[in-house]
Image (tube, helix red, strand yellow):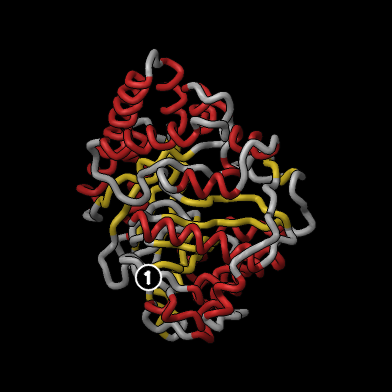
Amino acid sequence: MQVRSVTVGASAAFDHGVLALPEQLGPFLAQAHTYFARASLPVQGMRLACQPLAAVTGLTRENTVEYAQALARVAGILGFDYVSLGPVDAAHLDWIPLLIEALVNVETAFGSVIVAERGGTISLEAIAAAVTVIRTLAERTPDGFGNVRFAALANCPAGIPFFPAGYHEPDASPRFAVAWEAADLAVDAFSQASTLNDAEARLLEQVTTEGRRVVEAAEALARATGVPFAGIDISLAPFPRDDRSIAAAFERLGVDWFGSPGTLFVAALITRVLKRVPLPKTGFCGLMLPVLEDSVLAKRAAEGRYGVSDLLVWSAVCGLGLDVVPLPGDITAAELRGLVLDMATLAVTLDKPLTARLMPLPGKHAGEQAVFSFAYFAPAGILAARGGGAQGLFAREGISWQG
């Protein structure tokens, strides 16, 4: 287990081309690594999540890319590895072309589009806009890799420490949250368990014990810096190694292979345990199934053991949605819209935060391998597109959004 990120939420301003960030950020970063190191908790990276573009004081459409560049530069000097430009919502879709340019031009910037508001409203126009971003990033970034920095968000609150979902509530004071990489806790718990009840008990004990270490370090950091701690997202994020794979944990517990019958049962079991963990929590706090980030998930995709529809079904009981899903380069806009629409429908119906981070790979076809020279991705099979989509649903609303 390690800390994947300490994510600080803060409001930025960009008056007359001059970037301003809260003065607490420098002193906070100067001490953050120290407090986690004292608890023997390596921190993979520091991240800065800002408010939505439309809420940045002084920002205009004309200087959006300049703002993104300045934010990434200043944040990097302070010690942040990545920045979130925040989401574009359905009321501000005129910012979509600007978000695209910012993401194309700033490699450490993340962004998103809110396709379903908290409380139940799905915007088909925002979905169409999000798909335009996905298709454009696939075309304009090397190997379509830019889509790792973009997601469609449904029912997602501010304060999630995982990117691209993370953003800050406008005008709120700075605060921080922690995301960890902890799939190995499930691998260990399930490998040692004698029964299913024992598996649940062991997982609850390990997550609680390790989570307390993180929370104690975070709370000490908050006391020392005056920056409030908002909680830990205890989602069991994986790393592309079999001993740190959430899909491997499923197989250790007893499914024949990840994707076989019984997979949904184990997904629900893990999610049930995470809901019982007695820690200050924020974010998704559920099961993560990021295809490219998990070595066993990636292998089972290459073997054809599951498809995109299966991932949607498992999203009904887990906690993230469709994450870093490798797709054929020629997948249609209609199918992408349908996938995002179905994800948003699950999020609204079940009142849970879900996202879609979809990665069409130019020139690649279903069944081929997606291979990136990126330490946090494993070679994965490209999942098949069905060819159909929801174009008729969007046409009934007169939506043909192209940016």
Question: Does residue 362 appear in this view?
Answer: yes
- Say which residue appears at 43% left-offset and 28% top-offset: 186
Q: Position of residue 71 (x, y in %)?
A: 47, 68
Picture quadrant where residue 121 is located: bottom left
Quadrant, the C terminus? bottom right
Q: Position of residue 120 (x, y in %)?
A: 34, 66
Residue on which disc 1 sits: 121
In the rendered image, the residue lying farthest to the right is 363
- Say which residue appears at 67% left-offset and 53% top-offset: 327
User: Which amino acid does the dot numbered 1 rest on?
Assistant: Thr
Quadrant, the N terminus? top left
- In the displayed structure image, the side of residue 321 where residue 331 appears, left or right: right
Question: Does residue 79 appear in this view?
Answer: no
Q: Residues within 10 Å of mark 1 (few under 14, many from 20)?
A: some
- In the displayed structure image, the side of residue 82 where residue 297 appears, left or right: right
Q: How many marks?
A: 1
> Which of 146 and 302 lies nearest the eye of the viewer?
302
- Say which residue appears at 44% left-offset and 77% top-offset: 90
Relative to residue 143, is residue 206 depicted above or below? above
> Which of 216 and 382 lies nearest the eye of the viewer?
382
Relative to residue 373, is residue 347 depicted above or below? below
Q: Position of residue 283 (x, y in %)?
A: 35, 51
Q: Position of residue 263 (x, y in %)?
A: 50, 33
Picture quadrant where residue 399 is located: bottom right
Judging from the image, what secondary structure is the residue with disc 1 in?
loop
Relative to residue 76, is residue 373 depicted above or below? above
> Which of 2 and 397 lies nearest the eye of the viewer?
397
- In the displayed structure image, the side of residue 361 where residue 157 appears, left or right: left
> Which of 94 and 58 lies nearest the eye of the viewer?
94
- Say which residue appears at 70% left-offset and 35% top-offset: 303
